[in-house]
Image: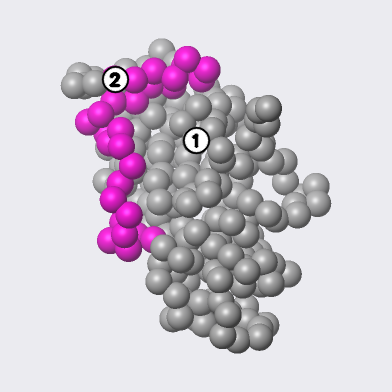
Amino acid sequence: MIADELKPLAASWLRARFPDAHITYELSLAEYGGALIDVGAICPDQIVGVEIKGDGDSASRLKLQGQMYSRVCRSVYLLPSLDLLKSCKKHKPPEWRMLVPPGGDLGVHSSRRLCPSSGISWGSTYGSSDPKRGEGYGLSPAALAAMVWTTEYGTFRVHVQEKHFTALPSRKADFIRFVADRYPLPVIEAAVCATLRERAWSGLKEIQYPEVTN
């Protein structure tokens, strides 16, 4: 399967796992371009990413991607094509978890789960529960702050619940430094998630929103 065939499966899996998430493709790690998360789920309290490796892709960049993506994603999953499954298992960053496309097998598991809507499976030996919250898993206050657009500083200020100053620094570099130095990581993470969930994408990106139930 090529990457464009795997991406909708990853989005379906994320929706099943995180029903309240805002899901999008190619979520940028910063305000202007740079590294992109293939499929991102913006939850109320965390960002979850899925890296796709389709037929014709290479697993050689996974080490570098592991260093970058884990700065903003609390959890990162790897979904390769069947042909790349073996190579991706070898190069997968240790803190990432493996997802298996329909028809694949990761080997023997004490527990293996299947997502009916996507056909993706995963096992407990690759981490079926969310990791402990903390900076030791690679989250970076500065990298999270960099995801906020300069036009969103007012929204971020509301969500960070800052009451003791009138404005955030206007220059991007100063804003990032100020936020990273002033607030604890959990506060930054929650405020960034809330800001992204309120973002006016204005047609720049397709967002899959949670289903509204009465």
Give the amino acid at mark 2.
Arg
Instruction: From the top left corner, tell me how far across and down residue 16 is, in percent.
Output: 50, 27
Mark 2, secondary structure of its residue: strand
Quadrant housing residue 171: bottom right
Magenta span has 50?
no
> How packed is label 1: few (under 14 Cα within 10 Å), some, or many (20 or more)?
some
Mark 1, secondary structure of its residue: loop
Display coloring: one colour
Closer-to-camera residue (22/88):
22
Residue bearing the label numbered 1: 18
Residue 143 visible in the displayed image: no
Closer-to-camera residue (172/159):
159
Instruction: From the top left corner, tell me how far across and down residue 115 is, in percent.
Output: 44, 19
In this picture, is 103 found above or below 109? above
> How packed is label 2: few (under 14 Cα within 10 Å), some, or many (20 or more)?
some
Magenta span has 124?
yes
Which disc is residue 38 wearing? Answer: none
Magenta segment range?
112-139
Which disc is residue 112 wearing? Answer: 2
Q: State the CA–CA distance, disc 2 to disc 1.
A: 18 Å
Between discs 2 and 1, the one toward the N terminus: 1
Residue shown at 62% from the left, 59% from the top: 195
Residue shown at 54% from the left, 33% from the top: 19
Give the amino acid at mark 1.
Phe
Residue 176 visible in the displayed image: yes
Residue shown at 59% from the left, 27% from the top: 8
Instruction: From the top left corner, tell me how far across and down residue 33 is, in percent.
Output: 63, 60
